[in-house]
């Protein structure tokens, strides 16, 4: 492990997917360009899901065509099945992500499939990606709690992480989808998963519903995690968690990491400006404390 923390920026996909008003494709491309200019090197661009289910991301092909090529950045995209993968591959995508839930109840409500059925759906995706030389990242949602079944068994998370890693995912992002986790539980979960897969293959993804995201990240850093997902301006959130304030804001994460002595390669001032720009574009205040402080805005 090193003193460098890799940030996976998810604003363009996870941050925007639940926005009620359609964000113009050109604005999404501008957001990604600005994020890359801040020094972020992994920026999740979009999702090749059915436009019927996520209208906000119906422009996946058009957006990916606008992204720069060979600029040193990685632009992974989410794919739910083989059809989505083939759409992404046709656009020149070099990294994809697949997703599953650790909660049976959430999996059934979210995608109308059991956990085992969801794995069966993306098994051919991973097989094709391996054959095509495409990197695959795995997401596990509801790792610290589910809006339907409540507590989630750590053993279920560990088993799913092991399965995804064995299938070929180079990294597993553990997502606290509804933001109910606390530092002790987050650290214990990471240590349990690290008992089955390498720590360097573990990322964390916290929503800030109860204001615990940064504390959870700190606990996971202490356990050895060095990859963290975040969304500029705190955009995003889970539609199943009433009052959820969105993802951990990238500005707040970078400020904290730099204060703890970690390197990120990110220009914080430029990132704050990007968060302010996005907030204006969406017509609402930023959820980032650092953003508000630097712009002297009230919460």
Image: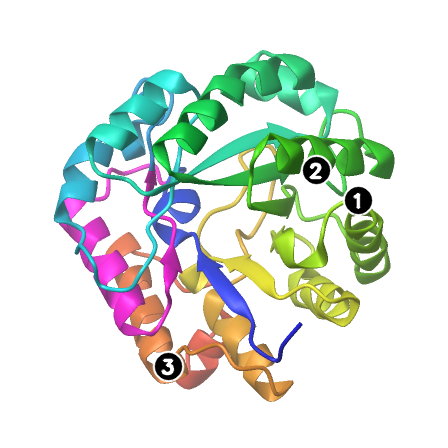
Asked which secondary structure carries label 1, the reply is loop
Secondary structure of the residue carrying tag 3 is loop
Q: Please determine whether, in this image, residue 160 is positioned above or below residue 110.
A: below
**Closest to the observer: 115 or 169?**
169
- Label whose residue precedes the other's in the sequence (2 or 1): 2
**Residue 241 magenta-highlighted:** no
Percent of width and height locating residue 144? 76, 43
Examine the image and state in which quarter residue 275 appears: bottom left
**Which mark is nearer the camera, 3 or 1?**
1
Span shown in magenta = 19-46
Badge 1 density bin: few <14, some 14–19, many ≥20, Cα 10 Å = some
Asked whether residue 114 appears in the rendered view, the answer is no
Residue beneath disc 2: 161
Q: Is residue 245 above or below residue 49?
A: below
Give the residue at mark 3.
Answer: 267
- Left or right, 64 with respect to 148, comes to left
Separation (CA) of disc 3 from disc 1 = 35 Å
């Amino acid at each position: 492990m090193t003193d460098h923390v890799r940030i996976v920026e998810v604003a363009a996909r996870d941050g925007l997917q639940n926005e009620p008003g359609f964000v113009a494709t050109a604005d999404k491309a501008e957001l990604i360009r600005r994020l890359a200019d801040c020094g972020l090197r992994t920026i999740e661009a979009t999702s090749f899901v059915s436009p019927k289910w996520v209208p906000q991301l119906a422009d996946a092909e058009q957006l990916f065509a606008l992204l720069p090529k060979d600029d040193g950045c990685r632009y992974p995209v989410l794919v739910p099945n083989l059809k989505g993968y083939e759409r992404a591959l046709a656009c020149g995508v070099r990294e994809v992500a697949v997703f599953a839930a650790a909660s049976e109840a959430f999996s059934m409500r979210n995608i109308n499939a059991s956990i085992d059925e969801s794995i069966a759906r993306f098994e051919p995706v991973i097989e094709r990606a391996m054959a095509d030389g495409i990197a695959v990242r795995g997401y596990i949602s509801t790792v610290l709690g589910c809006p339907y079944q409540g507590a989630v068994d750590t053993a279920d998370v560990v088993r799913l992480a092991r399965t995804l890693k064995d299938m070929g995912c180079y990294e597993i992002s553990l997502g606290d989808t509804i933001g109910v986790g606390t530092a002790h539980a987050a650290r214990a979960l990471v240590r349990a998963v690290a008992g089955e897969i390498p720590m360097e293959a573990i990322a964390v993804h916290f929503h800030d519903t109860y204001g615990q995201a940064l504390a959870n990240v700190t606990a996971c850093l202490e356990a050895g995690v060095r990859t963290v997902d975040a969304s500029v301006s705190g955009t995003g959130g889970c539609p199943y968690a009433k009052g959820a304030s969105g993802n951990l804001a990238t500005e707040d994460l970078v400020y904290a990491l730099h204060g703890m002595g970690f390197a990120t390669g990110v220009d914080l001032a430029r990132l704050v400006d990007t968060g302010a720009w996005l907030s204006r574009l969406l017509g609402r205040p930023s959820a980032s404390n650092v953003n508000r402080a630097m712009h002297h805005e009230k919460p």
